[in-house]
Amino acid sequence: MALHPISAHPRLPEKKRKAIIAAVLELRSTVAGRVLLRKIRMDKPTKANYKQDYLYLESLNLSNYGTLKL
């Protein structure tokens, strides 16, 4: 699993999801951006990969414990 996988909810239009992810990843390229990331303890954000970062969660059967309704 990546240390800080970045993703956006699929309900967001794809163009906006890509823009959000790109903006967070772009912060790594400047000193000011790296300072901001360090302040929130996110030194190495990376684009999330579902299979690598989240697929294992399916084996935990978390749906057995209820769902959060927003």
Image: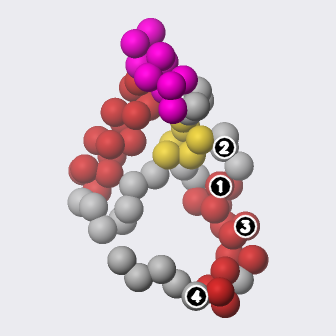
- Of the residues under marks 2 and 1, which one precedes in the sequence? 2
Residue under label 4, please give it: 66
- Of the residues under marks 4 and 1, which one precedes in the sequence? 1
Q: Nearer the viewer, mark 4 or mark 1?
A: 4
Three-letter residue code for mark 1: Asp
Asked if the magenta segment contains residue 38, the reply would be yes
C-alpha gap between disc 3 and disc 2: 13 Å
What is the x, y in percent for residue 16? 25, 50
Three-letter residue code for mark 2: Ala
Question: Does the magenta stretch mainly form a helix, a strand or a loop?
Answer: helix
Q: Nearer the viewer, mark 4 or mark 2?
A: 4
What is the x, y in percent for residue 28? 47, 21
Q: Nearer the viewer, mark 4 or mark 3?
A: 4
Q: Is label 2 in contact with label 1 (beta carbons under 8 Å)?
A: yes
Q: Is label 3 in contact with label 2 (beta carbons under 8 Å)?
A: no
User: From which residue to which does the magenta span run?
Assistant: 31-40
Three-letter residue code for mark 4: Gly
Three-letter residue code for mark 3: Tyr
Tell me the tag on residue 53. Answer: 1
58 up-or-down from 41: above or below? below
Q: Residue at image x 69%, y 69%? A: 57
Q: Secondary structure at mark 4?
A: loop
64 up-or-down from 28: above or below? below
What is the x, y in percent for residue 65? 65, 86
Q: Is residue 6 visible in this depiction of the protein? A: yes
Tell me the tag on residue 2. Answer: 2
